[in-house]
Image: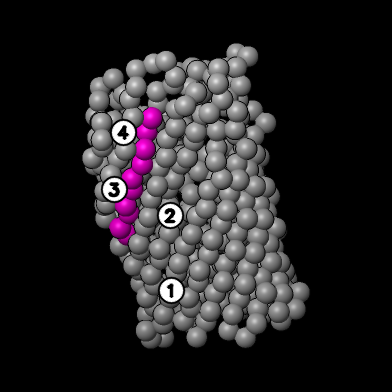
Amino acid sequence: MSFKFGAASLAFALSTTTALAGGLDRSGQSIGFIFETGNVVELSYGSVSPSVSGSFMTAPSGDIAPTYGIAALSMKSDLSDKLSLGLLLDQPYGAHVSYETAGYPLNTANAKVNSTSITLMGRYKLTDAISAHAGLRSVSADGVYDPSPVGQTDYASTYSKDSDMGYLVGVAYEKPEIALRVALTYSSKTEFALDGTAGDLTARMPQSVNLDFQSGVAANTLVFGSIRWADWSSAHLTDSIPAVGTIVEYSNDVLTYSLGVGRKFSDSFSGALTLGYEKGTGELASNLSPTDGYLSVGLGGTYTKDNMKITAGVRYVDLGDATTESIFSSFSGNSALALGLKVSFSF
């Protein structure tokens, strides 16, 4: 049986999602590239087009979630039969909302969160079946917060970039003859102190645990998936101006699930179908992310030519309904469409 058809690449193309789910999560902090065979360089890009709108009584908000992109670059090299070294550049967290419809209470309010991350990690094979991986991650963040609607006291702050170091550590079990791999990875929290043009910002992004798995179930057929826990109940964004105070906080942690099946159709082409799920909390949602949980379906394929793989995927996300805090607007019937593309070279 043959299973080497880029499950990690397919998983990326189908996991491109929206920051309107799972707190401010965008990348999910996957480290699947470190398990690729041989020396590999991968470049990926996703485009997410959310459609998010609601209403306050009879006043519609309009679509408040602009389209955004997310990029990543990873490099992995085998230093010996047992030791591998990897480098990952990605954008783990983000948000962007803009209220532009006249008559809505938050008209002209907007906010944006940007982040970049550099992860240097290594993997060491303890036995043929068991390996350990660990690394250091530097995360940088900046943003804008302008909550003042027309006719109210003007307040806006642009927060300059700050960085923090975190770490990751994990273990994996593999049985190559049936393409079985189970990997458990813990990532530490990161904290920031961002100077602002008005108020300053303190922020904490959550610690998390990722459980990734795959297994061959028949000739040329693979089942794969993940479970991610993120400690969003301890995360926050807080402005130093007392009248502004806490901008974002969460009452609950978040569990995100994905499950997929991949099939190799020929030496050149393979495809996959995935489902994703995140349970809603039922709590009031932030006006910066007025959705609660999601259900998604994705379809992708990988074309292989010599040492190159091109993977593309599309994902539809049904975003959960929510009622927002402070003004109690109702947001329902919302969704997002995500497109992902990855090109990888092995050498």
What kind of residue is marked 3?
Answer: Lys
Q: Nearer the viewer, residue 172 or 168?
A: 168
Q: Residue furthest right?
A: 265
SS type, badge 4: strand
Q: Does residue 156 appear in the picture of this structure?
A: yes
SS type, badge 1: strand
What kind of residue is marked 2?
Answer: Gln
For marks 4 and 3, give the CA distance. 13 Å
According to the picture, the residue beneath numbered tag 4 turns out to be 157
In the rendered image, residue 82 lying in the magenta stretch gets the answer no
According to the picture, the residue beneath numbered tag 2 turns out to be 91
User: Range of the magenta residues?
Assistant: 137-146
Q: Does residue 230 appear in the picture of this structure?
A: no
Q: Nearer the viewer, residue 100 or 171?
A: 100
Q: Looking at the image, is mark 2 or mark 1 earlier in the sequence? A: 1
According to the picture, the residue beneath numbered tag 3 turns out to be 161
As drawn, 47 above or below 333: below
